Amino acid sequence: MKLLEDAGIYVIADLSEPGLSIIRDDPAWTTDLFKRYTSVIDVMAKYDNTFGFFAGNEVSNQPNNTDASAFVKAAVRDSKRYIKQMNYREMGVGYATNDDAEIREDMAAYFDCGTKEESIDFWGYNVYSWCGDDSSFQKSGYDVRTKEFEKYDVPVFFAEYGCNTPRPRFFGDVEALYGDDMNGVWSGGIVYMYFEEENEFGLVKIDNNEVERLPDFTSLSSQLAKVTPTGVQMADYNPTNTAKSACPSVGEWAAEATPLPPQPNDQLCKCMYDSLTCVVNDSVDEEDYGDLFGIVCGLKDGEACRGIAKNATTGVYGAYGMCNAKEQLGFALNQYAKSQLDGNGCNFSGSARATQAKATQASECRALVSQAGSAGTGTVTSVPTGAGGSNNGPAATSSKGAAGVLSVPRFESGMLQLGAYLFVAGVSGMAMILL
């Protein structure tokens, strides 16, 4: 990070990673994910050149999985809350979306609507419609996309761009992106990608620790050298677009804007699990949990599973739907066992076992479980304090204002205080990369 700072490079970091992310076809916002997200924030907050974070990237990518956006928006809300709670300097939390014609407008509206506490600070757009040296501002559809975002109240930029058909890439869209047609609406973009991989989008190739600059690198450098974006200094930034977007109606769009899934609360989950008298046997493999969920949630119209429900389309969320799989299964088994008058409900062919509830003397546990209610359908208003990742303490708040060195962006009222910032490599010594 220090080397990047010395080179004048800001960083936007992904909060998720392949093994811990919100899955579009089975979305959830859980305690494990919250720990992952906050641990990344803890690590990155100490660096002055950390610009912000993406809470998700192309999670909802077509009409049949837009319900997943509710869980990503909850992650935006809770990540922003955590940054504030830990007294870290201001860092934005946004989202990067794909360019799907059927959902792109609803996606942008959904993540921007509502309160500033739960909406995005910036909007990243992954777009690959400018292909070849015969494309243009109009042919690529950039003109229509620019019109769509003219009144958007948070900064928008290309989180990925650089069509690679044909190759070598011409990068003619650089001139448009940083020219008069787009500079007043878009805050630049991040070219995809630096290292060459099988998908053939790289600017450089690494071989035996030797860096080879590919023709795409030369082409991009040439195009960047031609542009002279005007930009706005932070001190002069005075946004006129302040109205939040209207939330899309549920129909073809599948996610209610309110309520969002509850904030993951590890303490609540532990308190709940310690209060159970019927839990899953330790001998049961986690890969078999799905079968048990199917059985217990299929009994009595799913009554035992109301406390772990998570339905973004109806906006119905159980208090324990954010707990880990073992805790959720334990809750459901216990609920079913309690409903059996003969006392034989805790068995499930040996997959469940009776246990003694642990003493929960702590007033915090009693209060949390009480708010959740006996069926787990209550609203828990208490949120974790200082919960999450490595918690290395507040990050440095200093910033550098001298010419040629980094000045940390500020976020106020959900709006980025730098207008048409240069997301460019090689222009004025500044750059932006995605980790």
Image (cartoon, helix red, strand yellow):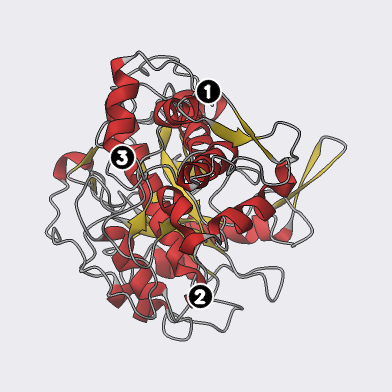
Q: Which image quadrant for residue 271? A: top left
- Residue lying at 74% horizontally and 53% vertically, measured from the top left: 196
Label 2 sits on what residue type?
Asn
The disc label shown at residue 2, or none: 1
- Residue lying at 47% horizontally and 64% vertically, measured from the top left: 301
Residue 68 position, x and y percent, is 46, 61
Disc 3 or disc 2, which is closer to the eye? Answer: 3
Of the numbered discs 3 and 2, the one sitting upstream in the chain is: 2
Secondary element under disc 1, as helix, strand or loop, is helix
Nearest the eye: 370 or 150: 370
CA neighbours of label 1 inside 10 A, class few (<14), some (14 to 19), many (20+): few
Q: Residue furthest right?
A: 208
The disc label shown at residue 64, or none: 2
- Residue lying at 33% horizontally and 68% vertically, measured from the top left: 182
Q: Is residue 196 above or below residue 244?
A: above
| Marks 3/2: CA–CA distance | 33 Å
Q: Is residue 276 left or right of residue 170?
A: left
Please give the residue where the numbered disc 3 appears in the rendered image.
373
Secondary element under disc 3, as helix, strand or loop, is loop
Q: Is residue 151 left or right of residue 24?
A: left
Label 3 sits on what residue type?
Gly
Q: Is residue 274 above or below residue 235?
A: above
